[in-house]
Each structure stands twice: as C-alpha cells, then as structure tokens.
Image: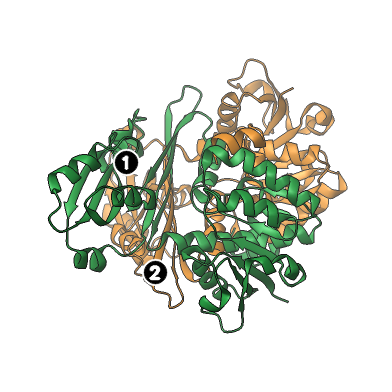
Chain colours: A orange, B green
C-alpha cells in the first residue's frame, strides 16, 4: 500500500511536492488543502482532489503524512502544531532563531495526538544543517563555512520592489569566488559579510523614475544591502521575464580541519547544491522525510524530530539489505 | 565521565584514531591492543598502555567501545565478530561485495553479547555511502557518480612493487576533470572506466632494470591498469621519499536529477573530500561513530548497524537542544 500524502497549502512549494510524489512509486497524493475556494484551485494530479483547509482534520483517517507548504513567518508557527495533533506532519520552517520554540510547540502537539512531526526540512535548514553536523562531528578541530547562491532571494527581491519607482525586481545572492577558493584551500580565512557574498539586482523601473535615486536607495538599504557589494542593473520588463523568471538557488557548506598529533594534516569536506528550482528541490527533501515520518509512526514513535534525529535509511524506499548491498 | 575507547591494531589507522581521540574532549584512550610484543610498540598517549591482543577480552569492563584498526582482507572478517561478543565495536570494513556477510556475522555476535557493532565506517564505505543514499532519496529521478582521488591507492602501489625490476612505487588515482565537469553540468554522461579516472605511477627502478619492460608490464596489467590511461614516471628513491611519502586521498559523490511535472528542472548535489591523510580522516569518522555506538548501547540497543542506521545527532558531543539552536 502506498503512503498517502496530503499537501497543505498549494503555492510553489505545494506544487513541487505534488511533482515529487509523482516520482516516488511508494507514495500517492491523497488530497490538497487550501485556504482559497477549492473550486478555484486546479492541481496536476488526476487522482487527487482539492479540499478547503478547514476540512483537513475531518479527513485524518485518509492521510498518512501531511506536508505543510506554508510560509515560516505566520503560517507554519500556527499550522504545524495545530495539525500535528491530527496527522504526522512535515514542514520546512526556516526561521533559524525560532526553531527551538517551534520544536517545543510541535513536540507537545504531536505527543498529544500520538503523531510524528519533522520540522525544518529542506536544504537550509535541512541538508546544509546535516552537513554542518557531520562535518563538525568528524573534524572536531576545524572551521565551518556556509555560502549561498548563486540564487534568487525572495526576501531581497521583495525589498527592492518596495522602493519607490520600482515596478519589478529580482535579486541574486552570489558567493565570492575568491573567498570560496581560500576556504577550499584550507586557509581558514575570517570572512566578513561583505567578503562572502555579493548581491546582483535586476530592476524594472517605472517610466520616468529617477534611476540614480533608486540605485542609491537599494545599495544603502540597511540589513538587506548596506553590508554587501551590490550591483544594480536596470532592464526592461521583457528582459526580466525572459531571463530572470526562474527560481534557481544553491550554495556550499564547507568544513575544513586539522588532524594528526601535531595538527599536521589538513582536510576539506565540501557539500554543494546547484538547483534550477529552489521550491522543487525543497519539495523533494520534504517528500523523503515524509517517508521517514510514516515509518517512525509505524514503529509507534511520537513527538517532534529534525533532520538530525532521523537515521538516513528511513529516507529510502529500499530495504536495509538492499541499501547495504548496493549503496554502502 | 569520558567514553573509554580501545584501539585494536596499531598501524596508520590505529595511530589516526589515537590522534582523533585527543581532539574529542568527551573521549579517552583506554588501551591499545596489538598482536606484536607490546613492549615493542610505543604510542603517543602518556595516559594509556599497550596490551597484547589476547588480553583484550579480559579487559571488557574497562572499555566502552573498541575501534578495530585491522585490514579488511583477513583481520576484520574474523576480529569484528569475535570482539562484538565482548565489546561495542566499530570497524572500517571496506570490501563492498562482502558487506552483507560481514553484517550478518557481526549482528549475530553483537546480539549474543548484548553489544552494538557499527561496520564499514570511514569515507567509502562511510560518508560517500551516506551521500549516495541521501542523494538517491531526495532526487528519486537521477543518476549517481562516484569519483576517487586525487589520491594514493595502496593496492595499486603494491601491485607495481611486485613487478620485476621495481624497487619502490606510488600510484595515484586521478579523476578525469572533463568527466567531472560533464557530470556537474547535469549532462548525465555514460562513462566508461577509462573515462572516469587516470592512473599516475611514480616508480623507482632497480639499477640496470629494463625501464621499457617495466612500463609495459604496468600499463598492461589486467584489473589494475589495463582499463585505464596510465602514465609511468621513473624517479629516484630520494624524489619518491621527498615528494610522494604522504597518503592523501579524496573524491566526489555527485547525484544529478530532474524534477518538475515534465522533468523540466535539473539539480546537482555534490559532496567532495580533499584529504591530506586518508587514514587520519577515516579515523575521525570511526571516532565519531564510536560516540554513537556508546550512546546506542546506553539506550539498550544491540546488534549490527551501518552508517545508514545512525541518526546524525548521535555523532555529535552536543545535545539535541544545542544542535537545534546552533547548527540547524
């Protein structure tokens, strides 16, 4: 029998989860839940239906794992604990500073409902976190580096769009190649914010807008751009659509360290992602952890987990014997 | 109280484990066991003693985890099951084809003695296996690539040393850069053995030896070199010592795959290692998994495990709270 997955929230991430389920033969999409009018939401999967979010709890017996596809600012802090009482849940909560509180809330709710919740699943937090942990555990004497990009930052793009005279914009976070090279060479550099990433902005201005003023406002914007070397490129709406409509992202987690009695040997561990679609890749990670949540629940486990708590074998559709024979 | 670690076998790997223990404050070296006369083996740690291998079983109460540092050909298949009856054990068994049998033997012995055994720990098998598994689970629709090097292959160096007229030799396995680039670009190439790696040999010939004959014998050697583009460099004994006495290694695990309803997006996950000392890095992985074995045993778990079965959090000296707050 397939693992019956529910999708709660149908934006880029929800659609990505739907696509990922199609690629995993041991899973099926059971239902999509939306806060919009279900009649206005059309999905890709013929065999599944769209329901209003309010109907979810009543369908608890028909869904093995619910994947929450809302935002971290206001959706997930409320939705994940609420649903964890009724379902095994997975979310991609990514407000790093609030993870401990979110973990506690989901843990309480999941235990109350005898379910499993896995939070902060994706690539950062998620696969990048795992690689920080593995790297730290292995090279106890070393330094950590995380670089993001080249990729689209939704938050920075939104910040530019709020500037007066801006019609549309896309912002790319770009790792500084020379910094990456120094880290890879085991030089253990101390890097400032400015030395690690640059920011490239592609901006469509309103007709007649003061371009110099827009540029100045962007590059001097506190928190978002002031601490970075930022380049602003004004382009046409057509060019923005043609060349910058994707949502690529990626990045690098590097752990460098020394071993030997006198710390005479250097080692570099590097993990990198190059993603055409940030939400679709995040979705693939969510779906793999949905399989893990299902299995943990089958074992009778309850409560909140993160990627740190999940043995890798739970993510794979293959058995332990198969994994040892073919992948070890 | 520290985790008391025993080292069973004191070659390059055993010394590496000793160095790694020094860097992990929650661990201490309890004893080193050797099949040689203990009086002839001097170790680096003042606070530990060397015992004969036969004394190990009698010291079971003084050692929390035994790390086996013997070879995979004949040592580990016998030693790991034998010791798993008396200790929690970790080994780096790396004969991929025999892992299922070794797993079954260690599992039976560990369960009999109520201990935990973790086998095939290191980087391949080990961290590379983990990355193959994570990559497969996430990008269900994709291809796997493992490249090794640049690094010293002990087996190939030994094979060259057996050629008549060869005094000493060192062989490097080198990944083909253009193949790596094609994989990274998501081109999904089908690669033959020859297209993935080249072999570089540094050979010290006996005085008066027939160099052309040696070279021909190396490059045509079945299994070891015939399927590769191999270069043979004759150098002096002094140059071999000065430039080729290290044991560097490393490599790349790459998973590339497609997502999207029509498979319209490409993704590349890459994990790479650049290691000055192959045995010291392997040792660091062994020590991190020794921590995991200790904790699993504390929980009352028994039997054989591989890296696939160990939740990452078990590897770190930090608590779950600390990990979630600082590393997620």
Dot 1 falls on a residue whose secondary structure is helix
User: Residue B84, image x and y in percent?
Assistant: 71, 55
Front residue (pair A306, A84) = A306
Q: Is label 1 on the same chain as label 2? A: no
Q: Quadrant of residue A63?
A: top right
Tell me: residue B308, above or below residue B3.
above
- The label number, if any, that marks residue A265 in the structure image: 2
- The furthest residue to the bottom: B46
- The quadrant in which the N terminus of chain B is found is bottom right
Dot 2 falls on a residue whose secondary structure is strand
In this picture, residue A28 sits left or right of residue B141: right
Pair 1/2: label in front = 2
**Which residue has dot 1 on it?**
B180
What is the number of callouts on the image? Answer: 2
- The quadrant in which the C terminus of chain B is found is bottom right
Q: Can residue B59 be seen in this snapshot?
A: yes
Chain of the residue under label 1 = B
Q: CA distance from mark 1 to mark 2?
A: 26 Å
In this picture, residue B322 sits left or right of residue A268: right
| Category of crowding for the residue at label 2, using alpha-carbon neighbours closer than 10 angstroms: few (below 14), some (14–19), many (at least 20) | some
């Amino acid at each position: 029998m397939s693992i019956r997955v529910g999708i709660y929230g149908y934006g880029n991430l929800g659609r990505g989860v739907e696509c990922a389920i199609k690629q995993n033969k041991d899973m099926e999409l059971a239902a999509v839940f939306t806060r919009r009018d279900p009649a206005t939401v059309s999905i890709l999967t013929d065999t599944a239906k769209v329901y209003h979010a309010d109907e979810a709890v009543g369908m608890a017996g028909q869904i093995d794992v619910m994947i929450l596809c809302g935002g971290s600012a206001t959706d997930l802090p409320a939705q994940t604990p609420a649903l964890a009482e009724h379902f095994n849940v997975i979310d991609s909560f990514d407000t790093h500073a609030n993870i401990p509180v979110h973990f506690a809330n989901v843990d309480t709710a999941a235990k109350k409902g005898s379910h499993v919740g896995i939070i902060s699943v994706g690539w950062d937090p998620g696969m990048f976190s795992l690689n920080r942990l593995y790297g730290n555990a292995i090279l106890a004497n070393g330094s950590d580096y995380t670089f993001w990009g080249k990729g689209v930052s939704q938050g920075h793009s939104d910040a530019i769009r709020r500037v007066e005279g801006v019609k549309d914009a896309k912002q790319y976070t770009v790792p500084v190649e020379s910094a990456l090279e120094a880290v890879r060479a085991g030089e253990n550099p101390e890097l400032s914010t400015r030395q690690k990433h640059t920011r490239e902005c592609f901006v469509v201005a309103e007709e007649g807008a003061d371009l110099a003023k827009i540029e100045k406002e962007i590059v001097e914007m506190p928190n978002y751009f002031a601490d970075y070397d930022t380049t602003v490129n004004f382009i046409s709406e057509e060019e923005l659509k043609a060349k910058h409509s994707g949502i690529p992202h990626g990045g690098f987690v590097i752990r460098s360290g020394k071993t030997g009695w006198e710390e005479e040997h250097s080692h570099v561990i590097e993990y990198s992602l190059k993603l055409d679609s940030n939400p679709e890749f995040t979705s693939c990670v969510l779906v793999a952890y949905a399989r893990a949540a299902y299995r943990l629940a089958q074992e009778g486990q309850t409560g909140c987990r993160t990627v740190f708590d999940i043995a890798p074998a739970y993510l794979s559709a293959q058995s332990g014997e198969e994994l040892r024979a073919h992948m070890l």
